Image (cartoon, grey):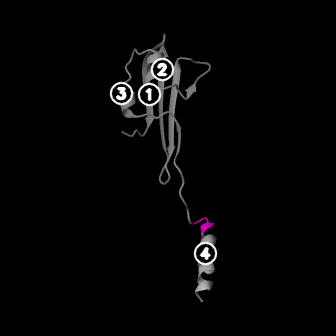
């Protein structure tokens, strides 16, 4: 009798493993530059493009028609919960930072 239960339980567990209502581990998906409030607070108006790139890394998007605008985008889709999208746009004039706009929820 015991010999019947082992294959039955094994077959049942393998069958349930393929069901879509049983979700397994989903790794978080992270894309773009990590944008934290602290990293944006270290930027100062008047910094050069080279200094900004050292602090934040290369921008994710560079407008081919406007080299004075850098866009940093960060997207995180955690294993469970709502995705997080953060954006920061930096504007330069004569190779100096003149304005920073940011959108999205920042984590500390």
User: Per the image, is 25 magenta?
Assistant: no
Mark 1–mark 4 distance (CA, rounded to whole Å): 57 Å
Which residue does the numbered mark 3 point to in the structure image? 41
Residue at the extreme top = 94
Who comes first in sequence, dot 1 or dot 4?
4
Circle 4 sits in a helix, a strand or a loop, which is it?
helix
Of circles 1 and 4, the one toward us is 4
Which residue does the numbered mark 1 point to in the structure image? 101
The image shows residue 38, relative to residue 92, as above or below, that is: below
* In the foreground, 65 or 51: 51
Who comes first in sequence, dot 3 or dot 1?
3
What's the magenta region? 17-21
Mark 3–mark 4 distance (CA, rounded to whole Å): 56 Å
- Tag 1–tag 4 contact (CB < 8 Å): no
| Numbered disc total | 4
Residue 71 position in % (x across, y down): 52, 27
* Badge 3 density bin: few <14, some 14–19, many ≥20, Cα 10 Å: few
Residue 103 position in % (x across, y down): 45, 35
Which residue does the numbered mark 4 point to in the structure image? 10
Circle 3 sits in a helix, a strand or a loop, which is it?
helix
Which residue does the numbered mark 2 point to in the structure image? 91
- Tag 2–tag 1 contact (CB < 8 Å): yes
* In the foreground, 81 or 57: 57
């Amino acid at each position: 009798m015991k010999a019947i239960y082992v294959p039955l339980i094994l077959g049942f567990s393998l069958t349930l493993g393929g069901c879509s209502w049983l979700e397994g581990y989903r790794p978080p998906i992270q894309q773009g530059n990590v944008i934290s409030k602290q990293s944006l607070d270290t930027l100062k108006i008047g910094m050069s493009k080279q200094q900004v790139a050292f602090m934040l890394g290369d921008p994710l998007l560079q407008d081919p028609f406007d080299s004075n605008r850098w866009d940093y985008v960060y997207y995180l889709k955690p294993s469970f919960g709502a995705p997080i999208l953060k954006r920061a746009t930096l504007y330069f004039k004569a190779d100096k930072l003149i304005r920073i706009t940011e959108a999205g929820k920042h984590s500390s």
